[in-house]
Image (tube, grey):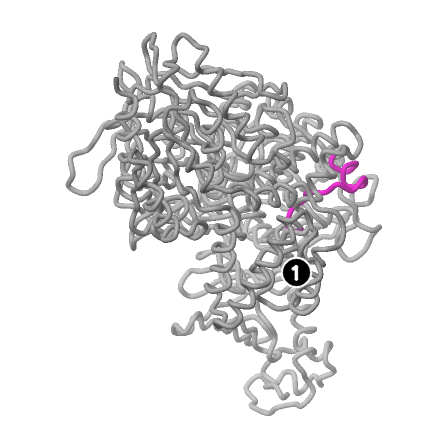
Amino acid sequence: MTVRIAAFALAATILGVTDSRAQDHGSTTSVGVTSVDEAAAFHAQYFSRPRTYTLTNGQTLIIGPFQGVEGSGESLVVFDTASGRMIGVGSPSLDTLAGQSDTFVLKAHGAQIEWTPRGRPPVTGAQDPELAYEDIRFGANGISGRLTALPGDDRRPVVVLSPGSGPASINFTYFPALAAHLARNGFRVLTYDKPGAGPAGAPYRDRVVSELAEDINAAVAALRMRSDVDAANIGVVGISQAGWSAPLAAVDGGGIAFMALVSAPPVSSWEQEFDSLTHDLAGFDLTDAQRQEARRAMQLMFEAARAGRVTEALSQAVSRIRDEAWFPRTSISDQPQDIAAWSRGYFDPKMTIERLNLPVFLAFGGSDRITPYAPYIPVWRERLAVAGANDVTIKVYPGYGHGLVNPVGPDRLVAPQFLSALTTWLRGRAGIEAVHEGVSDAGALSQADAMMRVQDLVGNYIVGGKTVALMSVPRGLLIQDLASGRIGFLQPDAESSTRFRLVSPDGWAVASPQTVSFRLTEDGPSLILAEGNRQPQTAVRSAAIEEAVSYITGDGLEQHGILFRPPGPGPHPVVVFQGGAGPSTRENFRAWAHMFAANGIAALGVDKRGYGLSPGDGPSATLAINAADASAAVDYLASRDDIRSDRIGLIGSSRGGWTAAMAAGVNPKIAFLVMSSSGPTSPRVQERYARILRVESAGHPAETVDLADRILSDYFAYLASGRTESAARVSENWRLYGQEPWYGLLRLPPADPTTGTLSSGLQVFSDDLRFDARSAFDILNIPVLFLLGEMDEAFPNSENVRLIEDMAQNHQNWTIRLFDGGNHNLMLEAPPGDVQRTAPGYYDAMVDWVVQQTRD
């Protein structure tokens, strides 16, 4: 490769170009001395410390090495402070930096730049006066740091930039740009390598929060000794993990005057890891049961860490999920060294924050699942109030993730309004005249206070006999509107501090035409639901009475739940919810329970054995065991004076429908059943349908589908027989086809299924395969309502409907409702410009039918 001599004279040193040639700026002569690698080496040297360029349009570019998230490798990045773009660039030649869609040409020894952004006309600029960089060491560990400032030895306030988790270096994420930016706004800025990170030093190891706080205090102590530092105005800006260590440093060391924290958790390290788990699993298509199983395993891991040893319960839980594709993405482990690390690293910031009486700036990303703002901000406010902190600023940036960074193709995007808001806040707390530089703070969520007010409204509301449930979940404030069938997150309307819009649960891009406002009156809070030109509806607080209850199952376990009762003494008819496969607790059906209570019917939400507060081994519970537990719940309810013992019904969802049918076959106190995505189709037929559909949907040809069907039939026969039939064929199928791309779609074990012992989950599944669902339903002589989705991806409802219609000739009190477009959860595919919603009429059909069955 050749390059124009007009590159810049510093290339002479790096590449051995003669001085006379290197100074020939106007020449078009080329010198065949460079390669891409040599150009990259030169740029790495020239920009080893950030350089800033001011463009003719007023924008500022900062070019330097930037480290990836969690201490990953460094690369050359151009940071555009106006848009927040972090543009990764390569070095095709000495005078050119190139991103995927941006080109930067360096001119006049690098003193000038020409940027062609994303196909738009070029814009030029000049390099600003060079910043002064000083390498320092501090603390007993000799931590490597870098001071960034404009030249001069006058006393200035200092900001210490404290990084997040992992082997973070001086160039952690967007710290180089932030340091350069703050330096040009009157600060000296210290960035540092975590011990063991950076180019030199001992091997990196994860340090506990108290050690990280000691590092910060060592930096502060070293800065206070300097004559060019205003010791009364030393602040800290911390990201993520530094949200624990920086406050601890402030309350223990006392030399920190103000603090800004980004994506900072106010809860314990174990509690926050549950939110990280939500983030880790977000990219996988998991059922609620699988997600709850992962959370259960993490809970057992922390219980083991508390006990200081690996427990049998943890080992069993991990063995059930170890082969799942999502497992390596999580921090779940049953290894002794990991349990010891979780035990050693536990930190609860509550007492620290309750002593943090100094100015605090908190910034969160609206789409951050690792440190979700909605549940975290109230905790921060409550604990800072205990400390007496009265200078607290909170910003939420909609659409941005952890650390206020989003990936955009090969680049990253930092919330651009954040830089301006942070700079203004820091200058004000450090006694520098506040200057608004660059883009204003208009993009920050000014309704953050309103979001905190609406947090107080979390609960269940009733409109037209249906529940509108407002729930605080890790990703934000979730609303489940059974009246319209919609489910989504609340996002503040830019034009109102009390009006919110529903946005899609799988992202913040799609907004529903429905809005939700809240109103506070003497009678209590209410929600105002509006859509287009329709008359707004008012939802008022549910009047249901919630009572924690427990009862003894047939094998002597104490099962727990909540009984939701209508106002008044009763006696009331009652429904009992039976969840599907996997974990299910009282919380799964809370919105439904309030809906039934509003219609005069009590409802019992149960913690299945092994989940919630109920003891036992949930994953090992067969249909018969769960049915016996359901029967015990019915017996308990029938014994209460406020419950009508002749009006007790079960509502079974998916696998819970089979449980309910089995219970009704043995307990005559059960007066009616509701089947949601369930029926007399056997588990073997249902599982075959769901798994073969995965192969068909992946586009495999008919002969592959037929082959997969035969393999599945052999496997099911093998399990149903107690591993006595078809073993040779199952093993041969695995040997011949186990590496085929479609084999995994059948959800078969990755190893030879005939080797080793069956997990508890496969033992239960084997039992399911032997269950005769038709016979279980055929013996029933009570009303049954079947609510089915036309597009159910897990249950073969075309076959299920034919079977029900055939059996209904002998069961005149059976009713079928098939909902167009409904999936297994009776949800519809979200239409353009709206959020996902339940099939219209689903809740009406359920409630109206149950009310009819409970009338005298």
Residues shaded magenta: 328-342
Q: Quadrant location of residue 77?
A: bottom right
Residue 540 relative to residue 152: left or right:
left
Indicate the position of residue 286 as horizontal and vertical percent values: 53, 48
Q: Is residue 331 magenta?
A: yes
Identity of the residue drawn at 62% across and 41% down: 764
Residue 738 relative to residue 604: left or right:
right
Q: Quadrant location of residue 853?
A: top left
Residue 794 relative to residue 503: left or right:
right
Q: Is residue 233 visible?
A: no
Q: Which of the image's four quarters has the N terminus?
A: bottom right
Q: Is residue 437 magenta?
A: no
The secondary structure making up most of the magenta span is helix
Indicate the position of residue 448 as horizontal and vertical percent values: 40, 34
Query: Mark 1 highlights which residue?
Result: 49
Identity of the residue drawn at 42% across and 20% down: 669
How many marks on residues? 1
- Residue 362 against residue 521 in the figure, above or below: below
